Amino acid sequence: QEHLVESGGSSVQSGGSLRLSCAASGYNFRIYSMGWFRQVPGREREGVAAIGAAGSTTYSDSVKGRFTISRDNAANTVYLQMNSLKPEDTAMYYCARDKRTWSHWSLTGDAYNLWGQGTQVTVSS
């Protein structure tokens, strides 16, 4: 069965760093693009970062220069390194798998069809 399990969420102070991990299982991880999304209750889900099957990356303007997405195909894991965290980064963070194989990347949630349960990130000022 296909699964994504996020970990690494925590409470940190503004300016701090966290690394989120997303462990994939049950499918051929290396041929799919992966993305990180975040959502605050009452607000729309936001695409934060994505990495293509070949390793190309993209970021939302809100995190560009502060967050880095990477993947380890041997470990079936995608990471999100978050630096210089701000209170507005507070959200539930989800990883997701693209619907398509060997795709480039996308920050649109509709492009993804497998989601993890989320991990909470809280940044205090």
Image: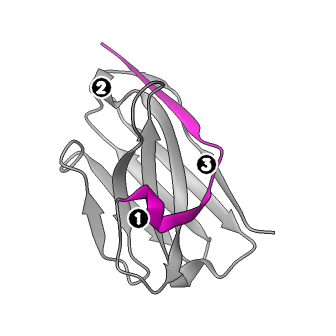
State the residue position of label 1: 70
Q: Please state if 28 lies on the left or on the right of 108 as rendered.
A: right
The label shown at residue 6 is 3
Nearer mark to the viewer, of 1 and 2: 2
The spot of residue 67 in percent (x, y) is 29, 49
Q: Report whether 67 appears left or right of 12.
A: left
Residue 45 is situated, as x and y percent measured from the top left of the image, at 42, 41
Could you tell whether 57 is left or right of 23 in the image?
left
- Cα distance, mark 1 to mark 3? 14 Å
User: Compared to 122, does 18 lie above or below?
Assistant: below
Disc 1 and disc 2: Cα gap in Å?
A: 22 Å
Crowding near pointer 1: few (<14 within 10 Å), some, many (20+)? Answer: some
Q: Who's the residue at 27% across and 64% down the image?
A: 58
State which tag comes first along the sequence, 1 or 3.
Answer: 3
Residue bearing mark 2: 88
- Name the kind of residue labelled 2 in the image: Glu
Residue at the spot x=54%, y=59% of the render? 96
Name the kind of residue labelled 3 in the image: Glu
Region in magenta: 108-125
The answer to the question of whether label 1 and label 2 lie on touching residues, with beta carbons closer than 8 A, is: no
Lower position in the chain sequence, tag 2 or tag 3 = 3
